[in-house]
Amino acid sequence: MQRGCGVQQWPADRGEEGMTETRMRPAAWRAGTLAVHAGFEPDAETGSVAPPIYQTSTFSQDGVGRPRGGWEYARTGNPTRARLERAIAELEGAAHGFAYGSGSAATATVGQLVLPGEEVLIADDVYGGTFRFFERVLAPTGVVTRYLDLSADPLSAVDGACTSRTRMVWIETPSNPLLKLVDIAAVARALGSRRGADGERPLLVVDNTFATPLSQRPIELGADVVVHSATKYLAGHSDVVSGAAVTSRDDLAERLGFLQNAVGAVPGPLDCFLVLRGMRTLELRVERHASNALRVATALAERPDVAAVRYPGLADGPHAHPQAALAASQMRYAGGMISFVPAARSGRTAEERARRFAERTELFALAESLGGVESLVELPAAMTHAAVSGSALEVPAALVRLSVGIEDPADLVEDVVRALDQA
């Protein structure tokens, strides 16, 4: 079965033997160029610049046990999906890529690398669905989950938490929704000398959804596996649900490939095409998301009726992010996500003002999800992170999360200011 995920495998599609040896290989291209071209090589049979969508569930075979070109059944592999898997792997600088039907499916598949009786250490601020999976799906099977703050002193945190049962360390950076940062390279170094389950070094898994591979490449910083909700920035248009995982370790790729096929939580070919198409403008969008977010975060930070602002790109002032220096060194862009807490005012509590704000914006649509071209607002405690209510990961009820889109920044600032004035 073809997988076609290595960054040096160019061209990777069937029937392209005529390509010359002098053509520049993807490994020599910068991320912005890869975003446009990875997985979008012209179709080998027709030369079509936009690749075909193989909308099929199965493939005719040349004989018993002789699938044509290695294609057998669409759950096991599909040429459109293979292009997407190769593209995401190349963007992340990884050797192997896997696509899934959702970000949660990617999380669940990678989570199954942890076996009953083993433990996973999880950063103490993660997406509510990630918490739900580890606590309500894996924990009842005997997997131990423990949460720790890896943002301040990751070396000490890892040293103090790892045991002989630790199989995996799972982090988001920036985290959802508090926008904490974790020094990926520092965690990788701390794990390098540790021996966990089966006497092996614990796996480092990084959810790179908020940063995207255009801003941050965890594999190069020592991560073993990188996961994405491709629904978000990779696809970028709020019209598809998809997920992905990449790794450069052949042993992990073999297991992830088995689980992908055995569990079957794979995306359809049209979904794969939509993510691929979205990725072609990824660098333009990520740059605009970040510049717009800085404008909005600065406007929020200047208001006396805002109690707290969290944005990795704020380096100065009373609302400066405590890890702004890490953001500058680890990330190419500070991202398009902001979280803030309004101050109580005019007899209204902070939570009341947060709800009024979220219901009064016009450009910022009140909706879950993030990373699309349009701006979104939500209250995590009542929406995306309701699953962590009552736990150690519970988020403040007055916390507002903004996904800043690519609209005109002046309009976005005006929308935020007007809604706060009315809140």
Image (spheres, helix red, strand yellow):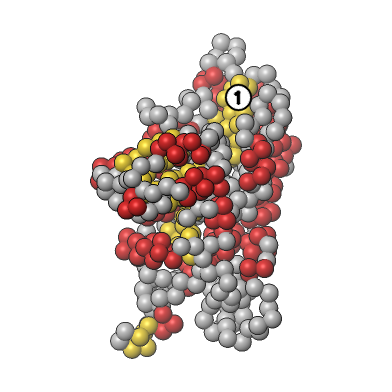
Local packing at callout 1 (Cα closer than 10 Å; few below 14, some 14-19, many 20+) is some
The percent position of residue 196, horizontal first and vertical second, equals 36, 48
Is residue 114 something one can see in this rendering? Answer: no
Q: Give the image quarter of residue 253.
A: bottom left
The percent position of residue 143, horizontal first and vertical second, equals 29, 44
Is residue 118 something one can see in this rendering? Answer: yes
The percent position of residue 168, horizontal first and vertical second, equals 40, 48
Residue at point 47%, 25% (across, down): 397
- Taking depth in this image into account, of 120 and 312 the one nearest to the observer is 120
Residue at point 46%, 29% (across, down): 395
State left or right for residue 413 relative to residue 399: right
What is the quadrant of the C terminus in the image? top right
The percent position of residue 99, horizontal first and vertical second, equals 45, 61
Q: Which residue is mark 1?
A: 308
- Residue type pointed to by label 1: Ala
State left or right for residue 7 relative to residue 392: right
Residue at point 38%, 54% (across, down): 200
Residue projecting furthest to the top: 347
Residue at point 41%, 52% (across, down): 201
Q: Secondary structure at mark 1?
A: strand
- Taking depth in this image into account, of 319 and 407 the one nearest to the observer is 319
